[in-house]
Amino acid sequence: MTTGAIDPVTLVVVQNGLQQVASEMDLTFERAAFSPVISEGFDRSDGIYDRDTGDVIAQGELGLPIFVGVMQFTTRAVIEQKREVVDGDVFLVNDPYCGGTHLMDVKMVKPFFYRGRHWAWLANTGHWPDTGGSVPGGFSTRATEVQQEGLRLPPVKLFRAGTMDDDILQIVLANIRVPEERIGDIKAQVAALTVGERRLTALLDRYGADTVSACIVELRRRSEQMMRAHIAKIPDGVYRGEAFVDSDGVDPDALAIQLTIKKEGTDLRFDFSESSPPCRGPLNSVIATTRAAVYLAIKHIFPDVPINAGCFEPLKIADPHGTFLYARYPRPVSGCAAEVSSRIAESVFTTLARAIPEDLFAAPAGTSGNLTLGGYDPLKERHYIMYVFSGGGYGGSHEDDGLTNGCSTIGISKTQPAEVLEQHYPILFEQYALRERSGGAGRTRGGFGVDYKVRIRRGEALLSFLMDHGRFGPPGLFGGKDGAANEVVVERGGTTYRSPHWSKDEDIRVVGGDSVHVRTPGGGGYGDPFTRDPELVRRDVIRGYFTVDDAARDYGVVIERVDRPTVGRDGAPTDLTIDHAATARVRREVRA
């Protein structure tokens, strides 16, 4: 069937069918996984990829956006091996330099056969809580070469014609901590691929391989067409922006991401060549992650474009050789996927805001808040690895305040429930709350981060954390104020410890009774705070988001208490009123 002969109903049904195949893979992986970071936090992704090019055909709607681009580069790396593949083969790979991210994101890639013919690839990624290396959990902040970060696997066949290669499995398990837990995650990944195989076979049986193939071509063409239509609305020109990483965890200097975007017709050209050179620490980014970060940033701006390789076709990214955004072996990269990718996305947002301000927003928290705890639980008599990530505030936009406690820019993950983590590990959440006063002031303010405190209940462990925006808060836009910076405080043995690298450190020994207190960033504000509706400022004060003094200082809104407080329709106390005359005077004086 030619693409011209596809009726619209069939096209939509096949599009949804491909999406459903990948989404069922996501759900299978999630429900079967042993690690809470996958089963509860959704740090995983599944998709269908082109047989010859590895281009993404469909990805599960529940998968992490950063993996959209990355897994197609991983699949291409498997294709480039030029090995003979048969039905039942499964490749295992986590090599960052083979279309990867950091070592903890472990991919499985499986050739999909239909009626004896290799038709496509199925692939998934799951974050393993540990892959060996010098630091439990893999987030080493002081690594100076990739070997210190964990076991690195080029594409190797874990399954051959449906039979697991026990030698490969034993090599993997012998090099990671708590290997008995990883067996469950490995089986979950394989199960997801098996479900995808069955569902894709059923789809092809129903509509025919030729029809589905023609639909894939047409869907790709339409995605490219939609993306080009969005880009066409951006004024032609050259736009420049920047973002900064606090430090590389080894040297104290900030790392600069300098971006130039050239818009011509319906193409966007991205040039990162003026960014900082490769760094000694683990904040280098491999090219697959750098490219994927640009893809996800554009998808944030134009979310209606369906995900497949077509929507990335108009995005031309020059390889940033000689910068920390083009890591080559053996540069360490443990922070690339979770942290550097968010800074890359932030640079895209701030750069394009100059061209299409009504479509953009101030900077989000932009950190995954990676925190790992590896130790021994004397009550359960077992070793453990706990990996936690947390949300933060999103930036204000042209129309709305930023989202509070939103997930990291790179994902759609959710924080694992405190109760689940307390069941699995010897810890207690003493606090988990909205971080008041953290959103940047603006005409639309930034959303708020979170404020949590974890206490070690028993035993001893090593604490590590790799976060960002601890030196610089998420920047505001068009006169909006910056969001609050990240804060991490460790309390141990009656003393307080703060890392010299703000929110990056490793191997901090803690014992029962010690605690770690994390306050994640708020989003940046958008527009002049003194143009914010005073009633919205009053509402935020009533809700406890910030104080009366904050309202006067940041927004120029003078709020007073009345003698006889009442309760409004929404149940909120109305004992605060705006002194409109004083507010007008303060705002005039500031503008003058």
Image: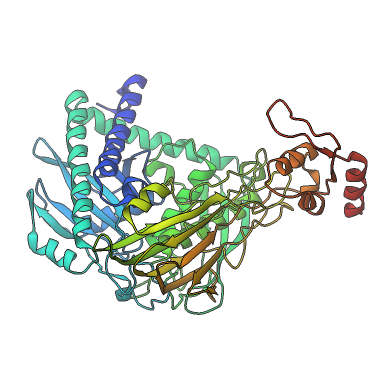
Whether residue 259 is visible to the viewer of this picture, yes or no, is yes
Residue 336 lies in quadrant = bottom left
Q: Nearer the viewer, residue 341 or 523?
A: 523
Quadrant containing the N terminus in the rendered view? top left
Q: Residue at x 68, y 29 (%)?
A: 571
**Residue 94: % across, % down:** 27, 61
Image position of 159 with respect to 23: above or below: below
In the foreground, 301 or 271 = 301
Residue visible at 42% across and 73% down?
506
In the rendered image, the quadrant that contains the C terminus is bottom right
At which x and y percent is residue 154? 22, 64
Count of residue discs: 0
By what rule are the colours in the image chosen?
rainbow
Drawn side of residue 283 relative to residue 20, left or right: right
Based on the displayed image, in which of its 4 quarters is residue 325 positioned?
Answer: bottom left
541 sits to left or right of 581: left
Where does the image place residue 407, in percent across and percent down from the top left? 48, 48
The answer to whether residue 416 shows anywhere in this view is no
- Relative depth, front residue between 147 and 34: 34
Q: Residue at x 31, y 62 (%)?
A: 385
Closer to us: 215 or 440 = 440
Residue 58: image location, x then y, percent:
32, 39
